[in-house]
Structures are given as structure tokens and as C-alpha cells.
């Protein structure tokens, strides 16, 4: 059965790795920029770097399309030559800041994983794209941006009739057939996963779709057995006592049945001690799953809510003595950053970075807080985002403490 990979998990990993790499590169130099050569060597995974450059080309072609106007002849030979020269010059003047580079990097990482999981998707999106038809020679131009499975794509394009434009759907269906016949040439997904895992831990199973949990089968409780009354005790016959013949026999009273002793209460087992729990986990059979061992170790331990209740005063003391931070950008963790971006800035990465950079330039806490509670809160409608806003305000207090 073909493995199903989760697109959402690929996107999430791409965002996390892009943020980590950008933290490492731009951390000490938040205003630094990247040129073309720097982009091509930004990560040790060449395919990721090439996909960033390809996205830049797509963006640039869109910008060139906006230059066209009905008032001028853009098909004139001199105009076309001038535009080509302009594009070549500008392509050597790439200048990317973090807010614009990080989303491109995240998408490139996601596309790299996508291509490793399904080469046919890479062929459809990265080579054919939106073209209604294309010749093999035209498709070969896009191979400059492919590193993974490049020989596989070259072999397919060389099998097509030279110089003949083929329909979009025909190209896709033909490539799927070619892929099935040459499955041995496909780069294993694990190779790409291992390359990325060096930068941020990743396993192939982390990308799988989660299988739906089957609903528990309805069970009918067993019918209780009919209650039966205990049999009555049989009377004990006493032996006859010899008496004189003149005296009538005296009946002997039957002894009462002995009372049934009350059931002895069984003492409850003592709560396991840490040593006994550890011994239980260590002596568990090898086939016992890890979560069962952990459950044995953790049984009897105080719950998380109880632990938090007992430690709340200490936590409050630590929070009130939180160390000062030099900048908000450095104080916000990766997970907290994504929380702010998604909850406060509607998923807009560039707007988040611009806001943090502006807050770091403000002179004191009062002005910074007023900017958050008045300007940003009304702009992004933070009426129901109090929890995240409070976290941001606490970070401001730490910066200006």
C-alpha cells in the first residue's frame, strides 16, 4: 500500500527549519541581506537553495508582466533586448532581507520534501507548471532548478519527440507511466530526510498521515446470573438417650446453626514507592511498550495540576524576577514566535517581523505598551487575544526593566 504523507506536516517542518536557520544567520545581524551567491549556499541541501532561486524567478517574471502596457510596443526587438538586459543586470543584484527571505525558504523546504515523497508532483508543479502545452526543450530549461531526481526527469524528457509540443494533461499522465516503469531510479525519501535531519531532527514517519483511530466496538455487558438462595441447613439428629421404661422419652432440642463469620476485610495495597515503581519498570518484559513502562513509573505520582498548585508561589517569584532581555526578537522563542504570527498577525510573517523591529526601537516601556494596546490592538482586532497580548506585554516589561 502506498504511503500517505501529510502536506500540513511538511509545511510545519518547513516553517520551523526556516525560522531556525534564519535565527542562526540573522540573529547577530537583523538588518543583514542575502545576495544570489549567498542564497545558493545558504543550506547544505542544494535542492532547497535552488527552489528559493526558482521562486525568485517566478516573482520576477510576475513583476515584468506588470511592466507591460497597452500604450507601448513591448514586442519591438529593441524593447525586448533592453528588457532582457535589464533582467540580467537585476538578477545579479539580488538583495533579500529576513522578512522576505524566510517565507521563501520555508516553502523551498516544503517543496523539497514534497518532491522526495512524490516526484510526479515536482514534475507537475516545477517543470510543467501552468503551461497548457510545452516542448521537451522548453521543459529542459527548468531542470536547472532541480537537483533531486534530476536524471529521472532528464530520461523522461529525452523519451519525448523532439520539437513537438505536448498537451499539459498528456505530459502528466505520460510521466506517471514512466515513473512506474523506472521506480528503481527514484531517490529514496530517506536520503532527503537524513539531509534535513542534520539541520533539524526529522524522521520519515514524522511526515506520515495520521491513521484515523477506529471507534471502540460497542460491548453488551454480561447479564447477571440469577440469584440463588443458599440451601437451608439440615437439622442435626441427636442420638437417643436411654431412659427408664416408665418415663416417656423426652424430645431433644435441635441445636441452632452456627452463625456465619463476617468476611475478613482485605487490606488495600500500599501505594508504590519511587523505588518499587522503578523496579517494576526495569523488570517489565522486553515486549512491553515504552508508554506502559512510563505509566508504571508515573503511577502514584502527583498530578500536574497538584504540582503546579504547590509550586505556583515559586513560579510567581521566578516570573517577577525574570531577567532583562536586550531585544524582543532574541527573547521570543521559535514556538512563541509562531504563536504570535498565527494568533496576533493572521499568519503574516513579514508584518510580525516589522512590528517586533519597531518595538525594539521605541525608547521606553510606556510608549511600547501604548503602541501595542492602542495601535496594534485596533489594527488587528485583538479583542479576544488577551492571553497572547499579555505575553507580549510581559516581554516588553523585561526589555525595559
Image: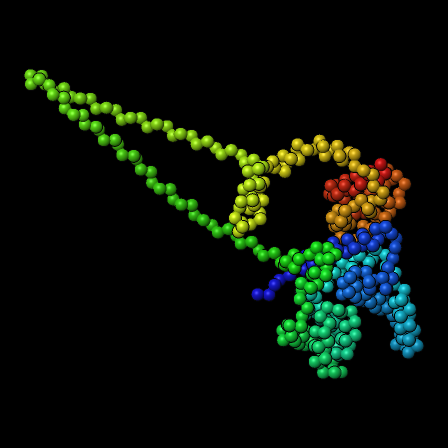
Q: Position of residue 10 (x, y in %)?
A: 69, 59
Q: Position of residue 188 (x, y in %)?
A: 66, 66
Rendering quarter of residue 4:
bottom right
Residue at the left extreme, as displayed: 246
Q: Position of residue 195 (x, y in %)?
A: 72, 61
In the picture, the quarter occupied by the N terminus is: bottom right
- Residue found at x 74% / y 80%: 165
Q: Is residue 283 left or right of residue 116?
A: left
**Colouring method of the image:** rainbow
Nearest the viewer among 39 and 10 is 39
Q: Position of residue 326 (x, y in %)?
A: 85, 42
Q: Is residue 248 above or below residue 287?
A: above
Q: Is residue 293 left or right of residue 200?
A: left
Rendering quarter of residue 314:
top right
Q: Is residue 304 left or right of residue 140?
A: left
In the picture, the quarter occupied by the C terminus is: top right
- Residue found at x 76% / y 65%: 47
- Residue found at x 25% / y 24%: 256
- Residue found at x 38% / y 30%: 263
The answer to whether any part of residue 73 appears in the image is no
The answer to whether any part of residue 312 appears in the image is yes
Numbered-mark total: 0
Q: Is residue 343 above or below residue 46?
A: above
Q: Is residue 62 above or below residue 162?
A: above
Amino acid at each position: 500500500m502506498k504511503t500517505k504523507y501529510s502536506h500540513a506536516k511538511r509545511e510545519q517542518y518547513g516553517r520551523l527549519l526556516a525560522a531556525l536557520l534564519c535565527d542562526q544567520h540573522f540573529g547577530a545581524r537583523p538588518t543583514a541581506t542575502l545576495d544570489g551567491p549567498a542564497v545558493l549556499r545558504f543550506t547544505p541541501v542544494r535542492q532547497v537553495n535552488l527552489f528559493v532561486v526558482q521562486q525568485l524567478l517566478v516573482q520576477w517574471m510576475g513583476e515584468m508582466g506588470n511592466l507591460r502596457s497597452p500604450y507601448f510596443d513591448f514586442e519591438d526587438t529593441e524593447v525586448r533586448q533592453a528588457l532582457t538586459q535589464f533582467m540580467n543586470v537585476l538578477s545579479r543584484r539580488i538583495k533579500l532581507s529576513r522578512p522576505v527571505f524566510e517565507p521563501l525558504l520555508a516553502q523551498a523546504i516544503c517543496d523539497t520534501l514534497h518532491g522526495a515523497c512524490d516526484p510526479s508532483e515536482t514534475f507537475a508543479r516545477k517543470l510543467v507548471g501552468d503551461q497548457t502545452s510545452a516542448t521537451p526543450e522548453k521543459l529542459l530549461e527548468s531542470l536547472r532548478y532541480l537537483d533531486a531526481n534530476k536524471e529521472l526527469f532528464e530520461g523522461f524528457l529525452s523519451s519525448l519527440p523532439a520539437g513537438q509540443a505536448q498537451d499539459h494533461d498528456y505530459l502528466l499522465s505520460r510521466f506517471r507511466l514512466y515513473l512506474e516503469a523506472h521506480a528503481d531510479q527514484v531517490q529514496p525519501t530517506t536520503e532527503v530526510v537524513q539531509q534535513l535531519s542534520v539541520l533539524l531532527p526529522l524522521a520519515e514517519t514524522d511526515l506520515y498521515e495520521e491513521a484515523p483511530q477506529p471507534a471502540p466496538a460497542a460491548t453488551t455487558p454480561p447479564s447477571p446470573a440469577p440469584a440463588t438462595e443458599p440451601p437451608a441447613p439440615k437439622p442435626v439428629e441427636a442420638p437417643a438417650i436411654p431412659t427408664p421404661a416408665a418415663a416417656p422419652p423426652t424430645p431433644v432440642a435441635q441445636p441452632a446453626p452456627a452463625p456465619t463469620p463476617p468476611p475478613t476485610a482485605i487490606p488495600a495495597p500500599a501505594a508504590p514507592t519511587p523505588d518499587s515503581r522503578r523496579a517494576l519498570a526495569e523488570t517489565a518484559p522486553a515486549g512491553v511498550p515504552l508508554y506502559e513502562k512510563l505509566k508504571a513509573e508515573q503511577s502514584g505520582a502527583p498530578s500536574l495540576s497538584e504540582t503546579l498548585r504547590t509550586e505556583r508561589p515559586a513560579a510567581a517569584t521566578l516570573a517577577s524576577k525574570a531577567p532583562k532581555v536586550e531585544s524582543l526578537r532574541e527573547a521570543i522563542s521559535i514556538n512563541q514566535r509562531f504563536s504570535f504570527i498565527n494568533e496576533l498577525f493572521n499568519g503574516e510573517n513579514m508584518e510580525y517581523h516589522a512590528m517586533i523591529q519597531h518595538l525594539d526601537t521605541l525608547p521606553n516601556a510606556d510608549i511600547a505598551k501604548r503602541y501595542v494596546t492602542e495601535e496594534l490592538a485596533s489594527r488587528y482586532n485583538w479583542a479576544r487575544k488577551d492571553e497572547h497580548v499579555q505575553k507580549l506585554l510581559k516581554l516588553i516589561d523585561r526589555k525595559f526593566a
